[in-house]
Each structure stands twice: as C-alpha cells, then as structure tokens.
Image (tube, rainbow, N blue to C red):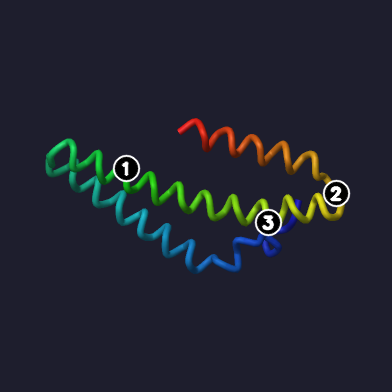
Amino acid sequence: MPTTSQYRYTKDKSSLLTRMRKIEGQAKGIQQMIAEGRYCIDIVQQLSALSAAAGEVSLLILESHIKGCVADAIRNQHGEEEYVTELLGAIRKAMKR
C-alpha cells in the first residue's frame, strides 16, 4: 500500500477539507435545530443535505483511489487483486445506504 504522501487525493486536500468543514457546520446546525425543537421535516431535509455532501466527498476520494492506488497496482502488477477486492468492498458498503 502507498504511503500517505502518495495518495492521489492529497492534491485536492484543501478542497476536500473545505467541504468537510462545511459538513461539520451542517452537523452543528442540525444539532442546534434539534436543541431548539425545530420542525421534523426541516431537520430531515438538512440531514439529507448533509448525507449528500458526505457522499460527494466519499465519491471524490473513491475516484482518487481508483485512479491512483488501484490503477497503479494494476499497471505495476503489484497487489492488484487486493486493491480490487478492497475497492469492491467499499463500493458494496456505499451502495447499501
């Protein structure tokens, strides 16, 4: 497996961290909504938005993994079966949402 500095997503680290800070803000906003006793549907809508935002970050990192780690393993014939198996497991988990 590559070292942290070799992960392809690190070139977009700033953008990914910005997205994660927005998700963190959404989560705090939802906590506040619950604390204030806001309308159920408003909370559910915000939770759906938070889930979609987290899903997008997940897809971006998964895309990076496929284009980087998996492609490199296949190209170099180094542990490609392990990477493909790991990738399929991640896709299965993501699809169970």
Residue 54's spot in the image, x, y percent? 43, 49
Mark 3 or mark 2, earlier in chain: 3
Circle 2 SS class: loop
- The residue beneath circle 3 is 67
Residue in front for this viewpoint, 59 or 9: 59
- The residue beneath circle 2 is 78
Single out the mark in the foreground, 3 or 2: 3
Is the residue marked by circle 1 packed among few (<14), some (14-19), or many (20+) residues within 10 Å? few
Contact (Cβ within 8 Å) of mark 3 with mark 1: no
Q: Residue at x 25, y 43 (%)?
A: 45
Q: Amino acid at mark 1?
A: Ser
Q: Quadrant of the C terminus?
A: top left
Circle 1 SS class: helix
Q: Residue 19, located in which quarter of the rendered image?
A: bottom left
- The residue beneath circle 1 is 48
In the drawing, does residue 24 fall left or right of residue 76? left
Residue in front for this viewpoint, 37 or 86: 86
- Measure the alpha-carbon separation of dots 3 and 1: 28 Å
Mark 2 or mark 1, earlier in chain: 1
Q: Residue 87, located in which quarter of the rendered image?
A: top right
Q: Residue at x 32, y 48 (%)?
A: 49
In the drawing, does residue 33 fall left or right of residue 93? left
Circle 3 SS class: helix
